[in-house]
Amino acid sequence: MQVIRFSDLVSQGQVAGKRVFIRADLNVPQDDAGHITEDTRIRASIPCIEMALKAGAAVMVTSHLGRPTEGEFKPEDSLAPVARRMGELMGREIAVIAHWTEGVTVAPGELVMLENCRVNQGEKKNSEELARKMAALCDIFVHDAFGTAHRAEASTYGIAQFAPVACAGPLLAAEMDAISKALLAPARPLVAIVAGSKVSTKLTILKSLAANVDQLIVGGGIANTFMLAAGLKIGKSLAEPDLLAEATAVIEAMKARGAAVPIPTDVVTAKTFAADAPASIKAATDVADDDLILDIGPHTAQALAEQLKKAGTIVWNGPVGVFEFASFENGTKVIAEAIAQSSAFSIAGGGDTLAAIAKYGIEKQIGYISTGGGAFLEVLEGKTLPAFEILQKRAAG
C-alpha cells in the first residue's frame, strides 16, 4: 500500500520546525467519576507523538472521546483526563486547548492537546469548511488512529485532503502492513476463523473470505447455522434458519475452489445458558431437541488445531464458543494455543478475540493484534477504508 509514512519524513529531516497535527485514537474507557480505567490506547499513541517532538516539530494531537453532541461541549466530553494521563506517562505537562479550529499557538518542541474533535460542528459529515480550517493549522497531517480509519470524517479524511502533507503514523502504518501481509499477499494456506453469534452480521465477511481463503473455520452461532445447512440438528441453539441459502452458498463457493468450511463433528451442549450448567460432549449427529450448543467438541477442536499448525497465514475474528464459561472454553482455548504455536503469520481483531488472547496469555505469539474493531471487520469484508484511500491518493500526488 503506497502511502507517505511519517517515520520516513522524520528520517529524511522534513519535520524539524514544522507544525504537525496528529489524529490519534485516545477514546479510552472511563468510570462514572471520569477516571480512566484502561490506558492502552494512550500508551499506543505516545511513540508517534514522541517521534514528532524529537524531530523538533510543534505538535498538536486530537481524538474523539465518547459520543458527544456536535456543537455542545460538556465537561464529561473533555480530553483533560487523557492529557493528564498522557502527561504522567511522558513526564510533561500537556495543555488542553478548546475552540481550536480558529488557530493554535504551539512552538517547536511543544505538545498541546486539542479538545475532543467530535464536538466540532460538521466533524461526522466531513464538512469541507471544518476540514480546511483543520488543515490550515498544520504543515503535516499524521493519521495514527486505525480505529477510525473506516470513517470519512473531517479529522480523519477531510484534513488529509487539504493539509500540505498527509501521511500515516506508525500505528496506522503497522495495521496497513499487517493487513497487506495477511490478505493481499498471504503465505498459503490462508485460514480464516470467523465466529460470532449471527451469520447476518458477518455475511459479507464470509462471502468475501470465501473467495480468497483455503479454509474458513466458523464458530459460535455462525457455526450452528452452517451445521443446519449441512443437514445437522442443533436443538434450541442460536441460529438463523432464514440464512441457510447464504451459508450453503459459502460452502459451495469454497468447495468449487477445492477449499473447505469444516463442519463440527462433535459439540459441547447444555440444557441452559449458564456458567454452572452441566456440559455434555456429543457427536454432532446426536444433538437433542432441548440442547444448546455452547462450544465445539474436543475432536473438532483438535482437528482444527492441526490445520492451524500447518497454515501459512491465519486471520482470527471471534471465539468459537462461550469461552467466558469454564465448561465451554475448551474449543477457543485449543484454537488460541494452536495459533500461538503455529509458525504462520497471524492477525487477530475484534473485542471478544482480544479478550480471549488476553485470557490465554498469547499476545506475544500473535503476529499482529489489530486494535480497529469496526475498521478491522470492514477490511475483512474486502472494503477499502477511507483513511487508506485518501492517504494513497495524497501519496500519488
Image (cartoon, grey):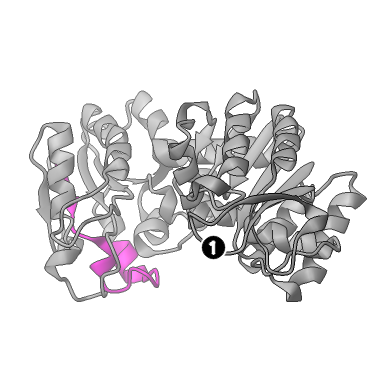
State the residue at coordinates (20%, 50%). Answer: 36
Q: Is residue 383 visible?
A: no
Residue 345 position, x and y percent, is: 62, 30
Residue that extends furthest to the front in the rendered view of this protein = 278
Residue at numbered disc 1:
273
* Quadrant in the rendering for residue 201: bottom right
* Quadrant in the rendering for residue 361: top left
**Eyeballing the image, is 337 above or below 377?**
above
How many numbered tags mark residues here? 1
Residue 178 position, x and y percent, is: 56, 36
Q: Secondary structure at mark 1?
A: loop
**Eyeballing the image, is 24 above or below 309?**
below
Q: Which residues are magenta?
A: 110-133
**Eyeballing the image, is 76 above or below 166?**
below
State the residue at coordinates (82%, 64%). Answer: 229
Residue toward you, 237 or 260: 237
Q: Amino acid at mark 1?
A: Phe
316 falls in the magenta region: no
Residue toward you, 393 or 111: 111
Residue toward you, 64 or 100: 64
* Quadrant in the rendering for residue 204: bottom right
At label 1, counting other C-alpha atoms closer than 10 Å, the crowd grade (few under 14, some 14-19, many 20 or more) is some
Q: Please state if 8 lies on the left or on the right of 267 as rendered.
A: left
Q: Quadrant of the N terminus?
A: top right
Q: Please state if 34 lies on the left or on the right of 208 as rendered.
A: left
Residue toward you, 242 or 91: 242
Q: Is residue 11 visible?
A: yes
State the residue at coordinates (72%, 47%). Answer: 217
130 falls in the magenta region: yes
Residue 63 position, x and y percent, is: 28, 54
Residue 274 position, x and y percent, is: 50, 60
